[in-house]
Amino acid sequence: MIDLFILLIIIGYCIFVIVQQHKKKKANTNGCNGICAGCSGCNDLSNLKDIYFANKAQEKEN
């Protein structure tokens, strides 16, 4: 009986670690893979699409 309990604890911990790694990987969606210095240049790319379209609109006006 105690062997089953220990086995369940080990399995639960493994699932916990896998879920945490999956969440960590999923949270890093800004494309920063560590190649830039401290990822300072790529820490927030969420507004990149807005900047791109603003530049395109500005080019059309000129």
Image (spheres, rainbow, N blue to C red):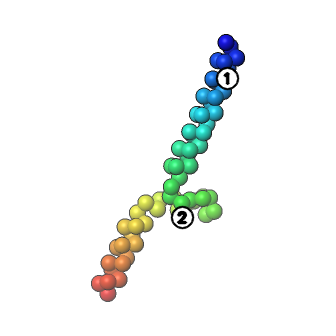
The amino acid at mark 2 is Gly
In-image side of 20 versus 45 (left or right): right
Tell me, for residue 47, which label it has, or none: none
In this view, the residue farthest toward the bottom is 62
SS at circle 1 = helix
User: Which of pointers 1 and 2 lies earlier in the amino acid sequence?
Assistant: 1
* 1 vs 2, front mark: 1
What residue sits 47% from the left and 59% below the top? 44
Q: Position of residue 13 (x, y in %)?
A: 62, 30
Residue density around tag 1, few if under 14, some if 14–19, many if 20 or more, within 10 Å: few
Would you place residue 11 above or below residue 51 in this image? above
Tell me, for residue 41, which label it has, or none: 2
Would you place residue 52 above or below residue 21 in this image? below
Distance from label 1 to label 2 (Cα)?
Answer: 45 Å
The amino acid at mark 1 is Leu
Q: Position of residue 41 (x, y in %)?
A: 54, 64
Tell me, for residue 7, which label it has, or none: 1
What residue sits 66% from the left and 27% below the top? 10
